[in-house]
Image (tube, rainbow, N blue to C red):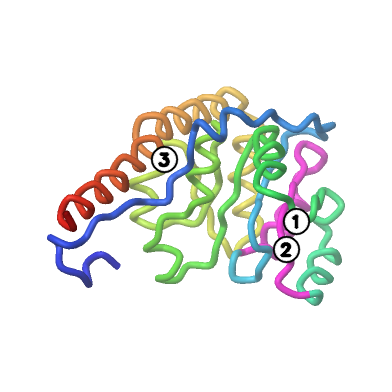
Amino acid sequence: IAAHFPPEKTTIARNYVSLEVIDRIVPAPLEKKGVSVIYMGNLERNRGIVEIVDAAAFFAGTAELWLLGKWESDALEADCKRSAGWANTRYFGFKSPEEAFAILKSADIGLHCVYPNDYYLKGLPTKLFEYASCGIPAVMTYSALWEKMFGAFVLFADPKRPEDIAEKITRLVKDESLRKSMGRTAREYSENTCNWEREGKTLVETYRRVNTCRQ
């Protein structure tokens, strides 16, 4: 978007997560059935929700899928509930940001298996910054940009192949050492690179320059 505007009049302030806010939130005291795999956001077909639920059918009691958000339609919700993976799925409904992050901080693996298109693959997925801030690794759709940014703490899967999503999840479920190591790397990435405490300074400096010009 910034490329469409004059560089001398343009400042980019990215929508990163505030670690100060995240760190104040207490993890939800949830009873867990194995490793918890979470997706929170709009539950839509093009965000891979059908394949994510289908992938849960391969968990064989070792993991549980957690879903938070609003359904795109009643029909899509019904389709997912007919999936064999629904038996390994826990649906929390729509939650406030504070409630959602409390649940996220109790999870072990994040998901972002959107269908590949330019809108998604050329953007910065807020979900990955949220996962990283909570110190959990993720399984996500591949893009060159996302590999460059998140490759150290994610595994890439084909979003239209539930068995591939399940295989990547299972790898992290079985290898606790890898899962925790990637989680630590994710948190370090959030602390050192992508957080609002750093990014917000850019916005404040922009306000300062604009105010100076007006004076």
The answer for how far apart the CA atoms under marks 2 and 3 are is: 26 Å
Q: Earlier in the sequence, mark 1 or mark 2?
A: 2
Name the residue at 62% across, 47% down: 167
Farthest front residue? 215
**SS at circle 2:** loop
Specify the amino acid type for callout 1: Phe
Vertical order, 133 against 77 (above or below): above
Q: Earlier in the sequence, mark 2 or mark 3?
A: 2
- The residues colored magenta run 48-73
Farthest left residue? 8
**SS at circle 1:** loop
List the residue tagged with mark 2.
Answer: 70
Kindly check if marks 1 and 2 are in contact, taking CB atoms under 8 A apart as contact: yes
Label 3 neighbour load within 10 Å: few <14, some 14-19, many 20+: many
Residue 163 falls in image quadrant: bottom right
Q: Is residue 144 left or right of residue 106?
A: left
The answer for how far apart the CA atoms under marks 3 and 1 are is: 25 Å
Name the residue at 34% across, 42% down: 199
Between 140 and 67, the residue placed more toward the observer is 67
Tell me where residue 30 appears, x and y as whole percent. 81, 33
List the residue tagged with mark 3.
Answer: 196
Name the residue at 87% across, 52% down: 87
Label 1 neighbour load within 10 Å: few <14, some 14-19, many 20+: some
List the residue tagged with mark 1.
Answer: 94
Q: Is residue 51 left or right of residue 76?
A: left
